[in-house]
Image: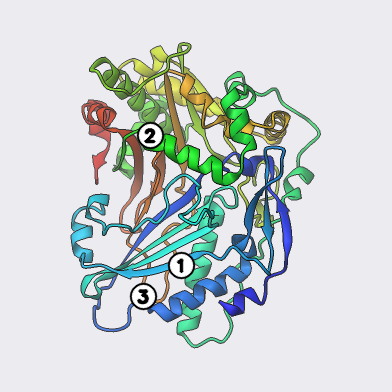
Amino acid sequence: MEQFTSTVKSQVIPLSSVDMLTGMLNIPYVTFYQNSNPVGDFMPSKQLKAAFYLALQAFPILAGHLRQTGNGRYTMVVDRDNLNMPEYLESTSDVHYNDIKSAGFDRSAWPSGVATVGTIMAPNANGIIRTVNTHIVRLKDNSGLILFLSIIHCVVDGFAYFAFLNHWAAACKAVRDGSVEVPRPLVEFTFDRSLIEQNLPTERKQLDTTTSSVFTQPSLFSKWLAWVSPETRGSVLRFRLSLRSSETHVFHIADSMLETLRSSVREFVPEGMRVSDNDVLVALLSKTFAQAERSAKEKGGNAVTQVLGSIGITSLACDIRTRIGIADKNYIGCPQIIPFVSNSLDDLLTPTTAQSLARIASNVRNLVNGLDAPYVGAFIDAVESVPSSSVHIAVNPRKYPAVLFTSNHTRFWVFEADFGDGHQEWMSPIHERSGSVMFMPCPPHTKGVNISMCVEGPVFKEVLANEFWMRTASQIS
């Protein structure tokens, strides 16, 4: 730890408007490592912890305190005399790795207390928001290890999260090999938030109506929420989330099934239109969720509590590094915009076929094709024009009769963290906001995509009753 603290330089990093769009959330993952040879020192505690603090040297922002600026924004204050040191815990469990694996890594099989924080960025019992929370759980009979790592989302996106995790793993291997110095990151990172503004074009594009309405229409509640401290905001949002009962399940769609689905959808899209896997998945999940929520409501569930208008909306979390030309800068932050694609309720609620999927997938593709640098500039202008815009995503989307939040993690370095005893066998994201899905890469030995969905109980029953979905996906947990 001292080796890290001695390298820290005090600095203040104002968070950007796009950082603030996720200023209410954590990125928490639970990672599972199997010990195939129970004899011996598996991912030894001393070296694992030492490597953690060595890895932090390349990410000093992770020891900063969030501070409210008075204009609806935060800054990260890194004060070497008052560091916000990560929470680092280690415990043991009487649960065997094989029991977790045989349950498909379902949460019901995990030891209690693995995840020390949840989706919402909120203060701990001492009233402090830790930028990083880590919990190492050693399983029965040295059968394996669970690694929980959470980083607040306004400081990192998925790219940056896995950059840190994999650098920690590389540092651990070096320490175990007897190296006196931690290996330098494969790339040099930059945390300079001005990089985004410096690379925006002067040209602007008209922002689509739905996205504009989500981020630029304040309410009294959103105005208040934007101006309170991050600790108060987190406490309020965590309480609101606790009022909704949700559960998380994982499904798998095989490569062959996804290719068949995409080929059938291509037959009904406009000639020459490119259709990606993501387009098809967003379309499929948008329809599946909308239909399940409607069925649950008709059967007396509480899936939809507010109904305004006749459209459903789906969010797309889009990395802007490539779009504004900074992909080579290895920028660490949360450089993403969150546009919403809108679809008529009729298109969402009609039975799922290749033709009905094509209408939704075409809308997704048309939106994605327009997400160029001028669009990014217009989006940032819009959210900067309204001080409370950063919290609107927690309030405004629920006004629509059907809403889905999507995030695609298939391009990240998810299964590359080898601490010296092999790569992880499984990773589970923690997301507790009902009506959200994450597209995850499969472990290396499996081809396809995993879908982690957070959904309310009555809605999930209707998902399982959706014939098209169940023909396409197989349930893992």
Task: Tell which circle, 2 or 1, labels the residue nearer the N-terminal end.
Answer: 1
Name the one closer to the observer, 9 or 437.
9
Task: Tell which circle, 3 or 2, labels the residue nearer the N-terminal end.
Answer: 3
Label 3: which secondary element: loop
Residue reaching furthest front? Answer: 126
Question: Pointer 3: what residue?
Answer: 421
Name the one closer to the observer, 410 or 66.
66
Q: CA distance from mark 2 to mark 1?
A: 29 Å
* Residue 300 in view in this figure: yes
Label 3 near label 1: C-beta < 8 Å?
no
Q: Is residue 38 left or right of residue 273?
A: left
**Which residue is painted at 64% across and 31% down in the image?**
388
Name the one closer to the observer, 188 or 216.
216
Dot 2 amino acid type = Ser
List x then y, in percent, for residue 280: 41, 32
Name the one closer to the observer, 407 or 21.
21
Dot 1 amino acid type = Tyr
Task: Tell which circle, 1 or 3, labels the residue nearer the N-terminal end.
Answer: 1
The label nearer to you, 2 versus 1, is 1
Viewport quadrant of the N terminus: bottom right
Residue 321 to residue 240: above or below: below
Question: Pointer 2: what residue?
Answer: 434
Label 1: which secondary element: strand
List x then y, in percent, for residue 169: 47, 70
Question: Pointer 1: what residue?
Answer: 88
